[in-house]
Image: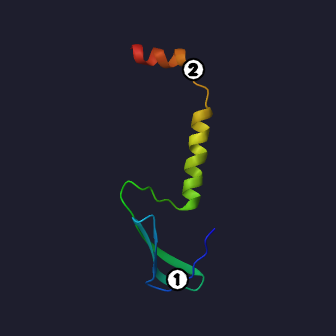
Amino acid sequence: MLALSRKKDEAIVINDDIEVTVIEIKGDQVKLGISAPKAVPIYRKEVYVQIQNSNKEAASANIDVQALNKLFKK
């Protein structure tokens, strides 16, 4: 992990097209602004973990193919 120190209004650049700027610092909270191409998904980590867990659960679900075929034959 790379650890950097930044002050308010200072930024870092990732891979030429993502910029993370420190917008505000209040006590133990830091507000960040992220500029990135629309094709780059940006999530808070807790949301990202929930998405990954949901995807794993969906991928491991047993599917009744015959019941699914019956739905489409109507």
In contact (CB < 8 Å): disc 2 and disc 1: no
Mark seen at residue 60: none
Callout in the foreground (2, 1): 1
Residue, x 53% and y 62% (percent of image)? 44
Q: Which quadrant, please, contains the C terminus?
A: top left
> Residue 57: horizontal and vertical position, in percent?
61, 39
Q: Is residue 16 above or below residue 55?
A: below
Label 1, on which residue?
Answer: 6
Label 1: which secondary element:
loop
Q: Which quadrant, please, contains the N terminus?
A: bottom right
Q: CA distance from mark 2 to mark 1?
A: 54 Å
Please report whichever mark, 2 or 1, sits nearer to the chain's N-terminal start. Answer: 1
> Residue 63: horizontal and vertical position, in percent?
57, 24
Horizontally, residue 50 falls left or right of residue 40, namely: right
Label 2: which secondary element:
loop
Quarter of the rendering containing residue 60: top right
Label 2, on which residue?
Answer: 64
Residue, x 61% and y 75% (percent of image)? 3
Q: Is residue 38 above or below residue 33?
A: above
